[in-house]
Image: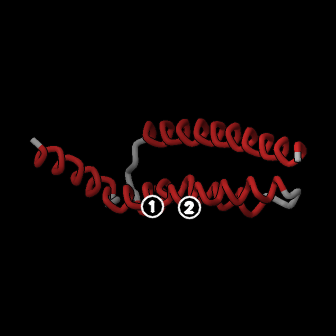
Amino acid sequence: MLESINQWFLSLGSEYGVNPYVFGAIYVGAIPFFILSIGWLVRRAKAGKSTVLPTMSAGFFFVSAYLYLAVAGRNIPVWVWVFLAALIVYGAWSSIRDTRKKIAAAKEEAEAR
């Protein structure tokens, strides 16, 4: 059964021109860099400095696997792009909300000192 699942998984890659293992490696490998970028963003916001570069960095790592799909993929169905767009919008909204909470908490902590 595992062999048939693996074969199906790999067939998706050949059908769409994307190596599923590379996609997965980029997806999982970007997580620590995304978290570090968010930490950098919170520290810069807490210090009252520009957050443009850490925001761009976090955004890049957030969509890096999908950039691979966009560049290397071919014949990707429209429903996949719609689904990915929904995931990205929800993830961005969630990340922005959580980051704003972290920044507010850090500022409150700094003011309490």
Question: Residue 92 at x, y = what percent?
Answer: 63, 42
Position of 86 with respect to 23 (left or right) is right
Task: Estimate how packed mark 1 is, as few (under 14), some (14 to 19) or many (20 or more) residues with alpha carbons within 10 Å.
Answer: some
Whether 99 is drawn above or below 31: the answer is above
The quarter holding residue 85 reads: top right
Q: Nearer the viewer, residue 110 or 97?
A: 110
Q: Nearer the viewer, residue 36 or 12?
A: 36
Whether 71 is drawn above or below 113: the answer is below
Query: Which numbered dot is residue 48?
Result: none
Task: Estimate how packed mark 2 is, as few (under 14), some (14 to 19) or many (20 or more) residues with alpha carbons within 10 Å.
Answer: some
SS for dot 1: helix
Residue at label 2? 33
Task: Measure the C-alpha gap from mark 2 to mark 1.
Answer: 8 Å
Position of 108 with respect to 96 (left or right) is right
Residue at label 1? 29
The quarter holding residue 59 reads: bottom right
At x 63% / y 37%, what residue is drawn? 94
Position of 22 with respect to 7 (left or right) is right
SS for dot 2: helix
At x 75% / y 41%, what residue is drawn? 100
Q: Tell me how many marks there are.
A: 2
The answer to whether mark 2 and mark 1 are in CB contact below 8 A is yes
At x 58% / y 56%, what residue is drawn? 34
Position of 88 with respect to 19 (left or right) is right
At x 42% / y 63%, what residue is drawn? 72
Q: Amino acid at mark 1?
A: Gly
- Quadrant for the N terminus, please: top left
Q: Amino acid at mark 2?
A: Phe
Whether 35 is drawn above or below 93: the answer is below
Question: Residue 79 at x, y = what percent?
Answer: 44, 36
